[in-house]
Amino acid sequence: MSWAAVLLATALLLDASGGRMRRAEPPSRPRDDRAGGRDDDPLAVASTLDVLSACLRSGMAVSTAASAVAATAPTAMAALLRRAADLLALGADPAQAWESRVGSGSAHLDAFLRMARRSAASGAALARGVEDLATQLRAEAGDAAGARAERASVLIAGPLGLCYLPAFLCLGIVPVIVGLAGEVLQTGLI
């Protein structure tokens, strides 16, 4: 029992990635955006795209819809939406309005901007493309969460193995081998 407790305590103290000791750190507080999440959160971007799609499907002008959605969008996306809404309201070319002067740094936002420029150039419906992009972002977020859960289950197996393997050997395998060895030695086969 004491060895199992020592092994369990050691396993809990060791970092699974390198065997270094961890120190307790206070939990970090999320940044306070308008959407309540981080800028790179694909679910926040997807929900913003859903609202934009609903606005466009209801018949709102693209500039009005972008301006309305920017109020609740994550900060990076809100800046892009406000800029595009202002330029579209002033009568700028849609391809120019949806152009990002500075790289957004987010694959989600870059994909949205490319899709908006293509839609402006080809006349394709922006609402359907935005809806498809939101669905794709949710699927990617679900896949990433599943991968993180699988990785966690693998990392949990190591400490459990350290605790239960010695107990299994001592209580399961060693008595069988000792019993068989005793019988073999008593019968004189060896």
Image: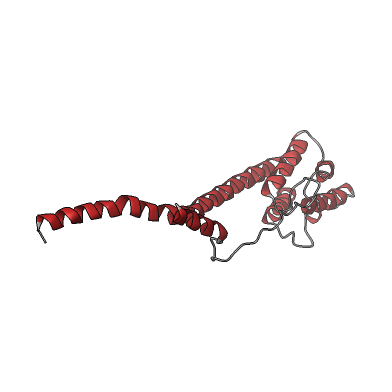
Work out whether residue 150 or residue 137 is closer to the camera in this orientation and state it.
Answer: 150
Quadrant in which residue 69 is drawn: top right
Question: For this view, does 146 lie left or right of residue 59?
Answer: left
Q: Residue furthest top?
A: 58
Residue 47, visible in the rendered structure = yes
Tell me: 50 left or right of 85: left
Left/right placement of residue 92 relative to residue 7 reads right
Pick the residue in front: 78 or 83. Answer: 78
Number of labelled discs?
Answer: 0
Q: Residue at x 58, y 48 (%)?
A: 145
Please give the name of the residue rendered at 69% of the width and 50% of the height, measured from the top-left corner.
41
Which residue lies at the image location 80% right of the left edge and 52% below the top edge? Answer: 75
Residue 95 location in percent, x, y?
Answer: 77, 54
Quadrant of res 96: bottom right
Q: Is residue 170 left or right of residue 78?
A: left
Q: Is residue 125 visible?
A: no
In percent of width and height, residue 53 lies at 73, 39
Between 101 and 79, the residue placed more toward the observer is: 79
- Outermost residue toward the right? 90
Q: How is the image coloured?
A: secondary structure
Position in image of residue 32 (x %, y %): 80, 50
The quarter of the picture where the C terminus appears is bottom left
| Image position of 5 with respect to 125: above or below | below
Q: Position of residue 30 (x, y in %)?
A: 75, 51
